[in-house]
Image (spheres, helix red, strand yellow):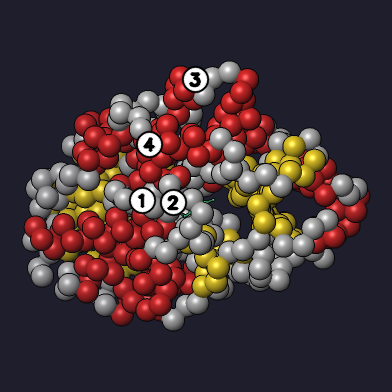
Amino acid sequence: MGYTILIIGAGASGLMAAYELSGAGFSVTIVEASARPGGRILTLHDSGFSAPAEAGAEFVHGSLPVTLGLLKMAGISYHPVKGKMTRVRKGEWIEQDLFSGDWAELMERMGSLQNDVSIEAFLDTYFAGDRYALLRSSVRGFAEGYDLVDLRRASTLALYKEWQEEGEQEYRVEGGYSRLVHYLEGACLARGCTFHYSTPVEEIQWQKDKVAVQCATGRTFTGNRLISTVSLGILQLAAGLPFALRFTPEIPAYRQAAAEMGYGSVIKVLMEFRSPFWEKKEKGIGFILSDEPVPTWWTQFPGKSNLLTAWIAAAAMRNFQALDAEGRLSACLRSLAVLFQVDVAFLKQELGTYSIHDWMMAPYVRGGYSYETVGSGAARARLRQSLEDTIYFAGEALYEGQALATVEAALNSGKDVAQKIKAQS
Ligand SMILES: Cc1cc2nc3c(=O)[nH]c(=O)nc-3n(C[C@H](O)[C@H](O)[C@H](O)COP(=O)(O)OP(=O)(O)OC[C@H]3O[C@@H](n4cnc5c(N)ncnc54)[C@H](O)[C@@H]3O)c2cc1C
């Protein structure tokens, strides 16, 4: 096509954009800071676990067309996630579903909201008082724990849109999400894309139809279009801070837009035991939501596996981050001991391999995923507009649709930006 496209980032979004653009005949160069593709998709192989284990994205949240379409094309199978969702309060197992009780009333009220407000303000206005104390704590826990939001900033209308999808069948990718990444990377290579790993971009110098990126390795790459797929966490870093990108000339309106959007974080802990001791408590456990310091756990059910995964966000995450390595392990084991009424000593004996992934500390990611704030629609619209048809932004945070903050969102965004470049070239 005569144009050279530079793509920063070989995550789902960058790979998808590269795949589409190289398929249309563009010359594509991908520059990636880390030594591997995938970004927030990180399937651990050869890390001491007996099977591939997901340290980043794990679920396909519903019948998502781009993700499932690619999996089919790649011949990668996936299987439905099953298992009971249990809540545990003060060690007591409660069979009540999170989405029962007052949840229907909540959704109805959210759906009739005219002007968007933060979820915190919404709960204070419409669900105040003792009558709704349990609902308020469940909603806060779900929004902070699952959507990784700051309650004072998160858009009630966006959460409503997303929570309407709850209950859809979810899937896990057989052998791990990284298989999809490697399929895309292979397809891009076959179409002539060039990948440069372990090559962090530090500065983007640009003018209309001309871009030069300076990398920490001393290399410079030039092109006619640039797609930045770095996470919102990276875009929100002021120039000069570690891992931040510098633009020359600077792009203050885009920086401001990024700051107005929401980006949360999470810690994921993978623990493989010598036996699935939790099955003695109950068969078919899927997810456990509790009030323990390490609150959320899941099994690999219906898959046969001795792996338990912990998910730690919000206040629980901040408390966990204050602990040293030994304290973190102890916190996980103590929470499990309460949940399953077993001794910590027994759990220590049963524990094989474990690994802790604090995504806030992941160098070129700096967090988990985005969420919508009140008014972030306008900010996202700004970021979705190219700078003089030369600099484009993509990534999960730039996606507009139902599957917010997911791999599907990232793939869609990469596809979308590729379409724009094709249309404008
Ligand atoms: C713990 C966790 C669990 C998740 N679970 C799920 C799930 O179950 N299902 C789901 O659908 N989604 C899940 N997600 C979200 C999903 O992983 C992301 O939405 C998606 O992978 C984001 O892809 P992306 O391409 O937009 O960004 P990224 O994957 O962040 O890719 C951006 C790339 O840019 C690179 N980069 C950054 N700065 C530079 C630089 N200066 N120079 C060069 N390269 C740079 C990064 O190294 C990275 O590879 C999860 C995320 C996390 C963190």
Q: Secondary structure at mark 2?
A: loop
Q: Which residue is mark 3?
A: 124
Residue drawn 50% across and 39% down?
Answer: 104
How far is mark 2 from mark 3, CA to CA?
Answer: 24 Å
Mark 1 in CB contact with mark 3 (< 8 angstroms):
no
10 Å crowding of disc 2: few (<14), some (14-19), many (20+):
few
- As drawn, the label of residue 111 is 4
Rendered view: 217 above or below 15: above
Q: Nearer the viewer, mark 4 or mark 3?
A: 4
Q: Secondary structure at mark 3?
A: helix
Mark 2 in CB contact with mark 1 (< 8 angstroms):
yes
Q: Secondary structure at mark 4?
A: helix
Whether the residue under disc 1 has CB within 8 Å of ligand 1: no
Residue drawn 18% across and 37% down?
Answer: 249
How far is mark 4 from mark 2, CA to CA?
Answer: 13 Å
Mark 4: amino acid = Gly
10 Å crowding of disc 4: few (<14), some (14-19), many (20+):
some
Q: Earlier in the sequence, mark 1 or mark 3?
A: 3
Q: Nearer the viewer, mark 1 or mark 3?
A: 3
Mark 1: amino acid = Gln
Q: Earlier in the sequence, mark 1 or mark 4?
A: 4
Residue 89, by quadrant, is: top right
Q: Which residue is mark 2?
A: 165
Rendered view: 86 above or below 27: above
Q: Is residue 221 visible?
A: no
Q: Earlier in the sequence, mark 4 or mark 3?
A: 4
Q: Secondary structure at mark 1?
A: loop
Rendered view: 346 above or below 30: above
Q: Which residue is mark 1?
A: 402
How far is mark 2 from mark 1, CA to CA?
Answer: 8 Å
Rendered view: 287 above or below 257: below
Q: Earlier in the sequence, mark 2 or mark 3?
A: 3
